[in-house]
Image (tube, rainbow, N blue to C red):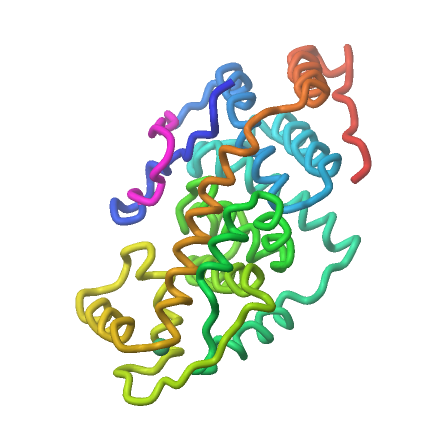
Amino acid sequence: MSVVHALRDPDLPEADVHHGRRGGSRPLSPAVDPERLRGRLSEEIPGLLRYARSITPDRALAEDLVQTTMVRALERLDTFRGESGLATWLHRILHNAFVDHVRRTREAPAEDVWEMVEGRWRDDAYTLDPATVAARASTVQDLRDALLRLPMMYRSAVVLHDMEGLTVPQIARVQEIGLSAAKQRLHRGRIMLVSALASGAERRAATRGVPMNCWDARTQVSDYLDDELGDRDRQLLEQHLEHCPTCPPLYSALVASRDAVTRLRDADTVIPRSLADRLERLRQESRRPKEDAPPPAPRVI
Ligand SMILES: [Zn+2]
């Protein structure tokens, strides 16, 4: 089974496309053949499972989310128009299934968690030990634990972008939000992940006499990381990083944790036999006429 393809949207502007950096480009034709589409659904399962396992620690729930996604996708196959890529469409279905689940089980309000982290990053004297962050990020279990401390929306944005290779416009479609909100979730998510990885190993340092203030620099590092800053902002930020005692460790921690999330992808590509069997049965049954055998209902999640 092949790995997920970060499908590029045919309607995306060129500037957005370079972020779909992994996987080949296979734009869909406007008339999508349902039979072909059904075949391609299974190619997306490894990516969906990886995504599901990164947003929930509960492996059974992750598998159920993938199954629910496949059930819903097969039910709605005729509504798929191909404007967003197949991977984006499927991730959106999975995302919504997980949002439903989170609503039922309640987690801490995302805004509260962000405010706490932001409060620390706004302090010019705040910094951390990048070696601690890099060490924790290199351990799959520690990285997973840290990811799970992020509110779901932020966790999802980081995983979709840095692990699954989706673009910001694709994340916006998956989460059904605007472009700037998607960008903000990625940026905040990365910051929160670094703080979660560093927790307990934070430091303070004097920051007098440094060009540009630290908060401005820190709000731009996520764009800097994705090479999206204009020349002038980039120069200013680089000057700041050169002189500031506190921001460079934060920046290198961001780079380290982003790279670790990217690598996490490879640790989780194997689909358990039982899930593969369940999905194969589903696919077979979706081929039969409805009155013959109704598609099985997903397990309650
Ligand atoms: Zn600074």
Image coords of residue 200 (percent x, y): 60, 68
Q: Is residue 76 visible?
A: yes
What residue sits 56% from the left and 21% below the top?
A: 42
What residue sits 51% from the left and 56% below the top?
A: 177
Q: Is residue 178 visible?
A: no
What residue sits 47% from the left and 82% below the top?
A: 123
**259 to 46, vertically: above or below:** below
Residue 19 is one of the magenta-drawn residues: yes
Image coords of residue 292 (percent x, y): 77, 10
Query: Which residue appears farthest toward the bottom when viewing the image?
Result: 208
Nearer to the camera, 153 or 127 = 127
Image coords of residue 276 (percent x, y): 66, 19
Nearer to the camera, 100 or 267 = 267
Question: Which image quarter holds the C terminus?
Answer: top right
Q: Quadrant of ligand 1?
A: bottom left
Residue 125 is one of the magenta-drawn residues: no
What residue sits 41% from the left and 35% below the top?
A: 6
**140 to 232, vertically: above or below:** above
Position of 65 with respect to 168 (left or right) is right
Nearer to the camera, 289 or 214 = 214
Query: Which residue appears farthest toward the right when viewing the image?
Result: 300
Give, as a single range, the part of the protein colored magenta. 17-29
Quarter of the figure with residue 71? top right
Nearer to the camera, 146 or 182 = 146
Majority secondary structure in the magenta region: loop
Position of 152 with respect to 132 (left or right) is right
Image coords of residue 84 (percent x, y): 44, 38
Position of 29 with respect to 260 (left or right) is left
Quarter of the figure with residue 61? top right
**164 to 127, vertically: above or below:** above
The number of callouts visible is 0
